[in-house]
């Protein structure tokens, strides 16, 4: 256990994190590409059309992973923010704020793909359904966190204020998750479960989990790249940054 704790402590050092992020961000992005390609090939060409929705159902292979990521990234951002507020770890502030634009992107994709699917299925692009409305509020929360972070000049104070908002916003996540159970909803109920029985056809499960894995790999690669850029910006003027810049071709 002690070596692991020491490794995490060392990773909190800006120069060490820079080397770690530089090494692994491109690896994660590269690993995501074949998984994404295989998932899309399975989803578009291998899986048979749904007996009720036809080929329209194929958008779920983008919609569902994006929806899960929109919640996962927000929870991760709040976790980083809590650690930063309690232990004053600057790297966690950077990671938390790097999560915000990525999470907003996944949330926007979720809303757009849901709208595209809803048009032929529900006959409308948008409905003030509890699941849709709460997901839209999540997007507003992401945008609010990004805006608050940009509005305060001092980076550490900005990260703490925006981080506190993300922690408060955690209360929205169970509302999104259970909205289809708590209220009458156009949105279909939970059909995919990590643990327990699922109503999703077996032929659809492999491409879905491939897409879930691909979005996770791409997210963590993007998170490291974004956090590394923010870390370099915050540490501008330090000797290790100057040496790093001099080493660049």
Image: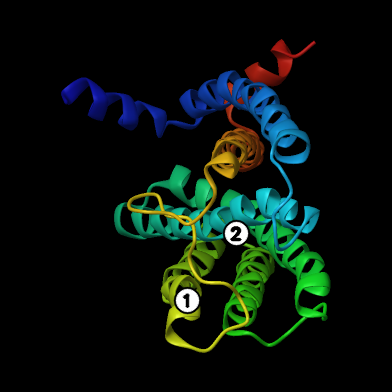
For the residues bearing labels 1 and 2, Cβ distance under 8 angstroms: no
Left or right of 122 on screen, residue 242: left
Left or right of 139 on screen, residue 213: left
Question: Does 34 sit above or below residue 131?
Answer: above
Name the residue beneath numbered marker 2: 67
Crowding near the residue tagged with mark 1, few <14, some 14–19, many ≥20 C-alpha atoms within 10 Å: some
Task: For the N terminus, give its image quadrant.
Answer: top left
Q: Nearer the viewer, residue 206 or 46?
A: 46
Question: Does 140 sit above or below residue 233?
Answer: below
Question: In percent of the image, x 73 and y 58: which residue is there?
Answer: 109
Question: Does 199 sit above or below residue 234?
Answer: below
Q: Earlier in the sequence, mark 1 or mark 2?
A: 2
Question: Which image quadrant for residue 121?
Answer: bottom right
Query: Judging from the image, what secondary structure is the residue with disc 1 in?
Result: helix
Place of residue 59 in the rendered image (x, y in percent of width and height, measured from the top left): 74, 54
**Number of numbered discs:** 2
Left or right of 164 on screen, residue 22: right
Q: Nearer the viewer, residue 41 or 200?
A: 200
* Cα–Cα span, label 1 and label 2: 14 Å
Query: Judging from the image, what secondary structure is the residue with disc 2 in?
Result: helix
Crowding near the residue tagged with mark 2, few <14, some 14–19, many ≥20 C-alpha atoms within 10 Å: many
Residue that lies at the very extreme toward the front in this rendered image: 51
Question: In percent of the image, x 67 and y 22: which residue is there?
Answer: 30
Closer to the observer: label 1 or label 2? 2
Name the residue beneath numbered marker 1: 172
Q: Which mark is residue 26?
A: none
């Amino acid at each position: 256990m002690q070596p692991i704790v020491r490794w995490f402590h060392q990773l909190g050092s800006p120069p060490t994190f820079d080397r770690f992020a530089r090494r692994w961000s491109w690896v994660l992005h590269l690993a995501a590409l074949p998984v994404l390609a295989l998932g899309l090939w399975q989803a578009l060409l291998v899986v048979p059309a749904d007996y009720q929705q036809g080929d329209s159902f194929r958008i779920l292979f983008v919609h569902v992973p994006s929806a899960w990521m929109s919640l996962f990234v927000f929870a991760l951002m709040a976790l980083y923010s809590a650690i930063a507020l309690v232990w004053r770890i600057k790297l966690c502030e950077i990671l938390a704020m790097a999560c915000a634009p990525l999470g907003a992107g996944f949330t926007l994709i979720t809303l757009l793909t849901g709208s595209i699917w809803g048009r032929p299925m529900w006959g409308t692009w948008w409905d003030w359904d509890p699941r849709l409305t709460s997901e839209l509020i999540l997007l507003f929360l992401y945008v609010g966190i990004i805006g608050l972070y940009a509005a305060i000049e001092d980076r550490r104070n900005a990260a703490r204020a925006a981080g506190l908002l993300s922690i408060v916003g955690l209360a929205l996540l169970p509302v999104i998750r259970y909205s289809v159970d708590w209220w009458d909803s156009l949105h279909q109920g939970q059909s995919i479960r990590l643990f327990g029985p699922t109503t999703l056809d077996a032929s659809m499960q492999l491409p879905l989990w491939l897409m879930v894995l691909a979005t996770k790999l791409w997210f963590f690669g993007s998170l490291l790249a974004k956090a590394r850029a923010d870390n370099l910006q915050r540490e501008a003027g330090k000797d290790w940054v100057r040496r790093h810049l001099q080493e660049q071709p």
